[in-house]
Amino acid sequence: MDDILDWIGGQLLIAERRPLRRHRALTIPTGRRVVLVAAAVVLMVLLAAVADAAGLINVSALWQQQPNVPSPEGVATSIPSDLAEAYAVLRQPRDSADALTGGPAGGYAAITVPGGGGGHYGASPSLSRYLGTIDGTAFWLVPGNLGSCLQTSNDGTSCTSNARMETTGTLGLLAGMAGHPSTVLGAIPDTASIAATTTDGSPATVQRASNAFMVSGTNLETVTIHPQNGRNYTIDIPETPAPGGIGPASGASGR
Amino acid sequence: MGSTLDSRSDVELLESSRNGSGGFDVFYTRHCRAVLAFHARQVREPELAADLTAETFASALLALRDRKRRLPDSPVAWLFTIAQRKLLDSYRHGQVEDRARRKLAFEPMQVSDDGIARLEQEIAATDLLAHLATALPADQFEALRARVIDELPYREIAQDLRCSESLARMRVSRALRSLRSTTLQAQREPHDG
């Protein structure tokens, strides 16, 4: 490219003529939006009930954004190039190991239900990539045209916009109850790193499998993602209630 | 790129762009070399300056498309406010942001040796101060030339303006406030959907 200023001008001209994707979502009728939000809330309640039955409660961040409307772009048919730049695994050819196992009935309904998180972002199970398995939990990255999801075999789904996927990735928090450890799991881009601390200030061990991570413990204090842009993202882990009732954990030190 | 012979004012071009009738390419053509020269004075490397120039105009286009924001009364001042903020962001984060370009689905920029040589020629041939002097009121230009373009200490600004240091601070502050009030809140970029 010899004339860079001309090239920039050309890109701007194309952009000026192209409608922004997110503006289309505003054209969805209010009535339909209300129905879809209600469906999404029901779905979240069902997932929370499943987590609760397993002795765990999804406290805040299993889903980064509340799903409300399906993607105006529909379900993705290809992986967005910016997303593929951020995750090398998405540039690899897809093979049988990348397929989600279990199907909607087996736990990934959130990806395929129109009002669910995956539907909100246009995530497509047919584009999924297997990231690895940590402590018996398998992780898949499921790209979409507006956002993407991290699907796990045991611990639900976490979805967020592709802009966030490309910088900090996505994560979910399973806050321990009745003496169980709290667990944070997620996926980060190739260029990001992650660190965690315990209540006594020492580093907590973060397990990794490709872009997936998991960190777990009864004394987990913070988890921080360090993206390439320097804007660190930290979540504080809620204190673990004591077994048998609500109150300070008997085995945990003060915060 | 758009023609520089277009007789419409910058304000008219931005209004036209917002209304979907085009015009941003003409605005770009008029001011891209000045913005490039502005960035080149700070970062020295032509390809970095081009990167910042692209992000500056992409942010400006994104801001224009947000109908909740008022159009600027002084488009050149608005544009250079965005440029300065992009520059400061790049200093702060140690890299040139590309968020606006990604939102607009820009392709990755490819830079050749010939391209860099042409950028250097454009930078050398552009008189940034002359460009700004014709676009801004005299008092704003003088204060901003020192504070935004040259980034000199207030003592030197005061000497340039032949006034006390405290008065220089007030004049710069007033000029910057005036700039901000005429901008499209360039610092507040649209959030993700």
Image: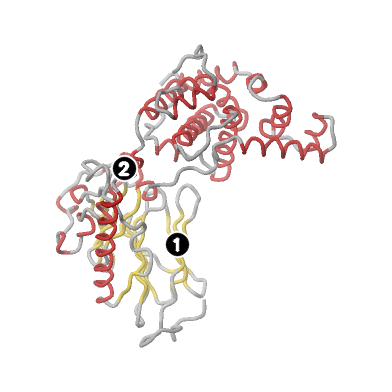
Q: Is residue B14 above or below residue A96?
A: above
Please say if the residues under marks 1 and 2 sit with CB atoms less than 8 Å apart.
no
Q: For residue B138, which quarter of the picture? A: top right
Mark 2 packing: few (<14 Cα in 10 Å), some, or many (20+)? few
State the image coordinates of residue B123 (x, y, percent, origin top left). 57, 21
Q: Is residue A58 above or below residue B5?
A: below
> Separation of disc 1 and disc 2 at Cα?
41 Å
Mark 1 packing: few (<14 Cα in 10 Å), some, or many (20+)? some
Residue drawn at x 42%, y 23% is B22
Residue linked to disc 1: A195
State the image coordinates of residue A194 (x, y, percent, origin top left). 43, 59
State the image coordinates of residue A6 (x, y, percent, origin top left). 44, 20
SS for tag 2? helix
Label 1: chain letter: A
The amino acid beneath tag 1 is Ala
Depth check, front residue: A204 or A232 = A232
Taking the image as shown, residue B146 lies to the left or right of residue A114, namely right
Residue drawn at x 53%, y 19% is B30
The amino acid beneath tag 2 is Thr
Label 2: chain letter: A
Residue drawn at x 41%, y 49% is A167
Taking the image as shown, residue B9 lies to the left or right of residue B115, namely right
Q: For residue A250, which quarter of the picture? A: bottom left
Residue lying furthest front: A31
Q: Of label 1 and label 2, which has the lower sequence position?
A: 2
- Tell me, for residue A27, which label it has, or none: 2
Depth check, front residue: B87 or A50 = A50
Quadrant (top left/top right/bottom left/bottom right) for the N terminus of chain A: top left
